[in-house]
Amino acid sequence: MENEYILVKQTPKLQGSVKVSGAKNSVLKLMAAAILIPGETRISNVPDIADVRLMQQVLESLGIKVGWPASDVVSIDATELNSHRAPYELVAHMRASTAVLGPLAARLGRASVALPGGCAIGSRKIDMHISGLEALGAHCHIEHGYIEVEVPEAGLKATEVTLDFPSVGATENLVLAAVGAQGKTTISNAAREPEISDLVDFLIAAGVSIEGRGTTKLVVEGILSANLKTGFEHKVVGDRIEAGTFLVAGALVGGPVTVTGFDPEHLTIVLKKLRETGADIAILDDGVCIERTGPIKAISIQTLPFPGFPTDMQAQFMTLMSVAQGSSIITENVFENRFMFADEIARMGADIRIEGHHALVNGVQELSGAPTVSPDLRGGAALVLAGLVAEGETRVSSLHHIDRGYEQFSEKLQSLGARIERFSS
Ligand code: UD1
């Protein structure tokens, strides 16, 4: 995979329909949640992406059985969970592995999880995960590169936690840990991304009582793991970020492009911003059709927790703004250093100046194809999008980033008429 690359040629027309897969950011947490359940559960609409395969390995390393009864269905049987240690070799590649902290603490009373790696987008801390677990009564410390969590004999105790910032990962970890605590835990200033609501739905199907779905205050009532339901199947919510990526592709080249398999309400602000750039958007039952006939207008965006503009759509929007008429300011409020992509697209002729957490993008007439390297998951996808409108050929390497989160990315773009091919050198 290291030697693979995508070659994109300037594409005059992009049109047709594409269906997105289940959300990466949801399925990984659902797989972690299955740790709580001593029995079999099934998850459907699972994307076959590298991060899912890694999470499968993390679960298997804990003694959990994971199978693929169909190409998009994963079965997880955590009856024989026999280890509390998630090894560095696996966790180092994927930050989302920290999602196993909460459920391991809840079910086994112990967790030992290597400090994570993942996308190099700023110093992604886990202090809120740790202080939340401590508020539930766990003892946490970091030793030899591992977070060690120990729950006292009496078990986790329900509490009230207010997060400093609505962190997605900390909210999820606390919800999962709270399932194993005695009493009702209240999490205030909780993140309310659709993937968290998906996790809440999964837990409710497992018999957990949770109030406040989709709000900033979640109340989770603890339950004995033996009393959790097994044998149910949960369908992963559609990937709004994958959908947004294809919609930006449509806006860039013109469309019409129809993207299905997701809930348009999960992209409300992205669709609003795409309209402001001059695109026509039609909302369908399970997707959106986008078309642009006029010029791309420059607009400004700032990333914020949901329902604000998603940080995971920032790089794709930067590509769109690179060829817009006028200047745009892109403000990144969620992660530090999430502008590495700007250096790569600048090599294709984009005019971008970074000042702190703002990027000033002056639209240029045309980008020019170049050899590029994916800086991270979304940045890699955004380079491929840039290649669609760049004169000549664009080569995007370091595909392992894209493969972490996009299922069949080049094939799906090809089905829309993109002049794109994947090669191994
Ligand atoms: C998740 C998503 C990621 C998305 C991000 C924000 C997954 C697998 N990944 O990441 O794609 O970009 O949400 O929507 O679901 N922070 C702290 N202390 C903590 C936790 C977080 O300071 O304990 C900071 C982080 O450094 C970051 C910000 O909070 O600056 C947001 O992080 P968070 O919402 O936790 O993102 P992730 O769950 O890592």
Image: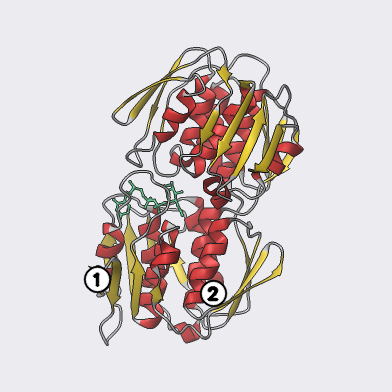
Q: Residue at image x 57%, y 63%?
A: 53
Residue 86 in percent (x, y) is at 41, 71
| Residue 280 horizontal side relative to residue 183, left or right | right
Q: Residue at image x 60%, y 14%?
A: 295
Inspect the image, locate mark 2, and give the three-letter code of the amino acid beneath it: Ala
Give the residue number, with chain letter if any, for mark 1.
Answer: 140
| Residue 28 horizontal side relative to residue 16, left or right | left
Which of the labelled discs sits on residue 206, or is there none? 2
- Crowding around mark 2 (Cα neighbors within 10 Å: few <14, some 14 to 19, many 20+) is many
Report which quarter residue 184 is drawn in.
bottom left
Number of marks in the rendered image? 2
Q: Nearer the viewer, residue 23 or 362?
A: 362
Q: Nearer the viewer, residue 417 or 172?
A: 417
Question: Which numbered mark, 2 or 1, is in the foreground of this view?
Answer: 1
Q: Nearer the viewer, residue 6 or 358?
A: 6
> Which quadrant, please, contains the C terminus?
top right
Residue 409 in percent (x, y) is at 65, 44
Inspect the image, locate mark 1, and give the three-letter code of the amino acid beneath it: Cys
